[in-house]
Image: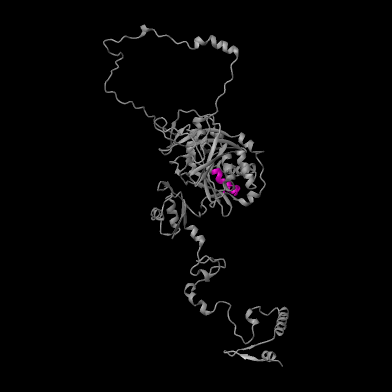
Amino acid sequence: MSKVEEAALADVVDGEGEFIQVKKKADKLQEKDNKTDKRKTSNNKSRSRNNSIGDGKPSKPRSRNSSANAGRTSKVAGFRAPNANARGAGGARGNPRKGGGKSRNYEDEEWRTVYIGFVERGTSSEDLAKVFKDSGEIERLTLKEGFAFILFKKESSVALACKLDGTCLNGLNLRVAPRKEKPPEVSGEALLELDMKKFRHEKHPRLLRDIDEFLQGFQCVGSFSQDKKEPNSIIVPGCPPVLDWNKMDAEEGEITLSRQAENAPELNTPDSIFKSVSVCSPEVEFSKVNIVTNRQCLMKLLAPVDPSIVYTSNKCFRMTCAKSPRGPLFLDLEAKWHPTMGTAKSFQDSITLPAPEMVKNIGYPGIFYRINQFTLGDMKVMVRTQVHAEDHEPILEFEDADNSDNDEEKENKDDFFDIEEKDVNDEKPVENGTVPNNIALSVAAAEWVPQATARNSFENSNMKWIKNDQVFNQPESRYEVKTVDIAGNYWEYNAEKSFYQMLLGGVDYLLLGILLNNEYVINKEEYDLIEVHTKVLETKNPTDATLVLSKLERILSKLVEFGKDLKEDEKLELVFDGRKEHLAIYKVKS
């Protein structure tokens, strides 16, 4: 027997009394095959790694040894993950060793967080903390470029913080909103409940052949400007912002923008619509109009009809629908006033002619609105839309007169320009240097001050209005003005939304200002409605617009149906819960 074989058969004893048998390589392979056969024939035997080790070897857990875990005991003591997908404090999912401590509830944090927009550059975290110090104890404040998030200790602080919406800080009015808003709670009689997922997949009859048929029924019936200094006051007809093509031809980089806010005092929306239409188009019969609303409400209703149109993280909203004394239903979004600010407003002012500073020595024209009317199925809808810019009214063209008319004009030329001669004898002479009719002259003449026109009151309302000297007219073109950063992908996320804004607002063109560093306009692009729709088709496969309008008509027709029997102290509440894709209409007491 060789020395190798003798060494192979020798039993080596270790320090702990366990025997480790040394075997040949061939014997090891044979033994491995035998174990494999045993595992195939025995299904009841555990596949634990410890059972495959020799009988005399004590079993050990697969986790770290006690010396490795000795330093982590205090960090993970008492920790218990709520589920396998729980994320620890360190950010690891389902691994308490790496995170340690109590697990972080992200959903609870979202309910306790508010979003703050339009934060001016240079604003510090301390400045924001001072504004919201009375809302509640702040757990964390995250400040970004132009916006911020505040996490409060208690969820009740969110409602208190939202009351500070519109607070001015460093020259800009803050926009404060909950990061995650709960669906509104309504206590009333449920008239209709719709599962919007099923609603979208149902077959709907098309009310329109194409978009041109919808646009043919579009008509502008009124306009007004909101008084930027007096709350709840309007100027009828309005003073539209006229596009200045000399400024549009400016070279790249010549227009410098800065974020600014529109001064939009409180305004009674339905009264302003009814008054402007009654002044500009007195032939309109309100009794034949079914719904009066603004474009923002129609855009909100597009979210349940087709969620891909409007990208938003907060799809819960509530609308009120009440019957007005003048006949039609008025649909309004839940009162949440937000100032319009940003570079788009500055770009609008840089390419339009300035509006008159004062009207009738009393009114200060501000934001300009037009009231449009269109037909959708069997309904007549009246919509208020803010117009950013317009072209001048069309120039009237006169045909050349015939020669016979010219001859007749020459014959009557003397009669047309015949000026009555004044008889000198008719003048009364001045006697003794005094002026007749007892008109006295004084050396100390006072400064002439034009008499201010008093504001008119709207019947059964606290709204004031001023009759403008301008004549209500139809513009040649209306423009929607927007801005986008050069690195931003505007068409991918906003093309379809812009298309429906133009369609429902009667807008002809989109003016897009391309910005550099959110400050300098380096390019100005103009698109008509067809070109914007082409951009939509290039980025996605959208739902046909005629089908979207047909679905929108079904929701509005339900409001008209339920609104016929409304009493004076009743109104409708339309509530949409985006998380459950649920739309409901309630009847409640006013």
Query: Is residue 211 among what the camera can see?
Result: yes
Q: How many marks?
A: 0
In the image, residue 100 sits, relative to residue 200, either above or below, namely below
Query: Colour scheme of this structure image?
Result: one colour
In the image, residue 254 sits, relative to residue 124, either above or below, namely above
Q: Nearer the viewer, residue 3 or 82?
A: 3
Q: Nearer the viewer, residue 202 or 371?
A: 371
Query: Is residue 326 among what the camera can see?
Result: no
Q: Quadrant of the N terminus?
A: bottom right
Outermost residue on the top side: it is 425
Q: Is residue 207 left or right of residue 478?
A: right
Could you say where residue 113 lies in the image, as x and y percent from the top left? 47, 57
Magenta highlight on residue 511 = no
Could you say where residue 64 lies in the image, as x and y percent from the top left? 55, 77
Magenta highlight on residue 306 = yes
Outermost residue on the bottom side: it is 1
Q: Is residue 128 left or right of residue 527?
A: left
Could you say where residue 102 lies in the image, as x and y percent from the top left? 49, 68
Q: Which residues are magenta?
A: 297-310
Could you say where residue 539 lies in the image, as x and y percent from the top left? 62, 47
> What secondary structure prevails in the magenta region?
helix
In the image, residue 347 sits, relative to residue 8, either above or below, namely above
